[in-house]
Image (cartoon, rainbow, N blue to C red):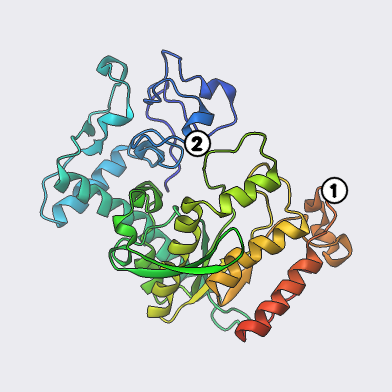
Amino acid sequence: MFNESTLSGNYESIYTDNPLEHDVSSRDAVMRLDGKTHHELMSDDDPYICYLNPPKRAIPLFTEQAARSFAAFAKRAGHDFRQLPADRNEFYDDDTKVNLPSWIRFVPLDKTAYWQCWEDWVYDTWTGFMERVCRETCLAQKGNDAFLGVIYFQLPSWYSLREASKSPVTYRYRDAAGEVHSATVTLADDPEYDRLNQVAMGTDMERLIASPWLAGVLHETTKSIHVQRLPKATPASHDIHVENDERYRHYYLAQGALLKKVCRDHGKRFGAFARSQYFMGRNPLDPQGFERAFRNTIMILEPDIIATIGPWFAAPEHIPEECRDALRGTSGILEEVWLRMCREYAGQYGRQAPRSPG
């Protein structure tokens, strides 16, 4: 549904490994990158151009069918908006380089009613689609006693908690010495609220959780948090640095606590992810790092469900033969730590201990 990627032949994405698409100095680039490199975007605080803040172009506002859908949605809401809005700030200053189709127009950001209608349409379209997927999955599993429901699994900043973010939430975190603290915040007041609740991802999490077709949520904690790297950082030292950063606490712990509250309010299960990969690079955590990450997220968030991932996770002999192609030559050094930490968690919080990944 939302998989269109180009506005014109000279649109170039920053989310790619293709070196040509990182050539921000190219006169053929339409996106307003301001001469910044891909690496600079990852830690930039520019409100319009930042790795943390994907462009509105990341969702398909480019087809006439999408425009008709938006116009119909706007009409039902009492507006006469017939063209999809484009944000001028996302493009270079030279208008001659941007050739918008007739069903798209530049709309100033102070036209709040127009942009609010667009925002509501995006959430309604994508979240409505996911609701239908959940419903069809549940109906297809009717009579299957082993089916326990649909679980949504996604990173923070890929879903929105718009109403819940307006109320205070208390969350816990560990400091560098391992001591547990509590803090109360209102996430809607945070300067990075828009980055944590990105319209471009199109997921109204509160609406989805309220749906009778969703059983619960897994709050993933594997995405790299973009903080300034220390000089000569290693994957292990960078992990510790990130875990003590305010942005980490905001994205993983405060947002996780808020998501847990929304789940509780609707009688749904809240799950969290035991991260098994370094924030820096793509290697699996060492046992010490995995245990620390487990204590800093799982033990703090206290989820109903604990999940993890990684083909390196389990020893080969504990993985079905038909699945071993995914191992990629890894050693399974985390399985013992995983089972030990899960047993400790189950004993401390009275939860059912998770099974071996095999």
Q: Quadrant of residue 324?
A: bottom right
Query: In front: 104, or 106?
Result: 106
Q: Residue drawn at (43%, 38%), measured in percent from left and top?
A: 4
Q: Secondary structure at mark 2?
A: loop
Q: Quadrant of residue 356?
A: bottom right
**Residue 10 x %, y %:** 42, 20
Dot 1, crowdedness within 10 Å: few (<14), some or many (≥20)?
Answer: few
Horizontally, residue 159 falls left or right of residue 37, namely left
**Residue 262 x %, y %:** 39, 73
**Residue 196 x %, y %:** 40, 52
Q: Which residue is mark 1?
A: 329
| Above or below, 111 relative to 219 | above
Q: Is residue 349 visible?
A: yes
Dot 2, crowdedness within 10 Å: few (<14), some or many (≥20)?
Answer: some
Q: Which residue is mark 2?
A: 42
| Above or below, 7 relative to 81 | above
The amino acid marked with disc number 2 is Met
Q: Quadrant of residue 265?
A: bottom left
